Image (spheres, grey):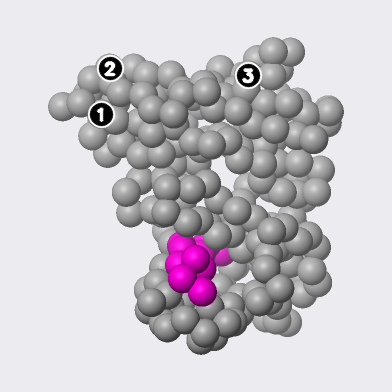
Amino acid sequence: AQTVTQSQPEMSVQEAETVTLSCTYDTSESDYYLFWYKQPPSRQMILVIRQEAYKQQNATENRFSVNFQKAAKSFSLKISDSQLGDAAMYFCALVDSNYQLIWGAGTKLIIKP
Amino acid sequence: DSGVTQTPKHLITATGQRVTLRCSPRSGDLSVYWYQQSLDQGLQFLIQYYNGEERAKGNILERFSAQQFPDLHSELNLSSLELGDSALYFCASSVQGRAGNTIYFGEGSWLTVV
């Protein structure tokens, strides 16, 4: 069975600082895709970043970047220059061979002004 | 704006009643997913349709049913509602439902059962 684990229920960071959210996963697939989604207090589910497992280069989207370690099955999200609007639940997810998203439990990110 | 449209945004109904939630996927997306998220919970996958056909079923109760129509919009029917069905129901869509296609979410339909 494929699993996604987020070991940090909650993280806090000072505004303008950098924070890294951890995610590990387990899959027997060789070709898979990983995602980070953000869910702010409005509860909308927003795609943050996507990584194809066959790509060695880490994905980057503006202030958001990932550290993808395929051998270690690790997929952490780094948020640079944290802003108040980054406060949200962050979910790591894996798409499995049945086209389903396997979700982590989420990490609540608190931004301190 | 993800391009996935859900209606209604909010709904309050009594126990025992039936409601229908509607979803229009992004233009060009053939696959539709339904998820349930209760307060302070993660997302529970309910069901997926691809081009009108059921593709995968998750933890969907027998009181719930869904379908995808020829124009690709989808409806989730919830019947004999119970207090525990109060939740945020998300619809999501992707291009072909293949692994790797990004799944985009609508804003959700808030259901409150009283």
N-terminal-most mark, 2 or 1: 2
Position of residue B60 relative to residue B81, above or below, is above
Labelled disc at residue A17:
2
Q: Pointer 3 indicates a residue of which chain?
A: A
Instruction: Answer left or right for A104 relative to A38.
Output: right
User: Which residue, given by chain and number where applicable, does mark 1 sit on?
Assistant: A111
Near-viewer residue (A91 or B96): A91
Instruction: Answer left or right for B21 relative to A112.
Output: right
Q: Amino acid at mark 3?
A: Ser
The picture places residue A47, in percent across and down from the top left corner, at: 50, 44
- Tell me the quarter of the image containing the C terminus of chain B: bottom left
Asked whether the residues under marks 2 and 1 belong to the same chain, the reply is yes
Near-viewer residue (A44 or A51): A44
- Tell me the quarter of the image containing the N terminus of chain B: bottom left
What crowding class fits label 2: few (fewer than 14 Cα within 10 Å), some (14-19), or many (20 or more)? Answer: few
Instruction: Answer left or right for B67 relative to A91.
Output: right
Secondary structure at badge 2 equals: loop
Residue A38 seen in the figure: yes
Front: mark 2 or 1: 1
User: Which residue, given by chain and number where applicable, does mark 3 sit on?
Assistant: A74
Extent of the magenta region: B82-93
Q: Quadrant of residue B99?
A: top right
Q: At 72% from the left edge and 58% from the top edge, which residue is drawn? A: B58
Alpha-carbon span between mark 2 and mark 1: 9 Å
Instruction: Answer left or right for A73 relative to A82.
Output: right
Q: Residue furthest left?
A: A113
Q: Amino acid at mark 1?
A: Ile
Secondary structure at badge 3 equals: strand
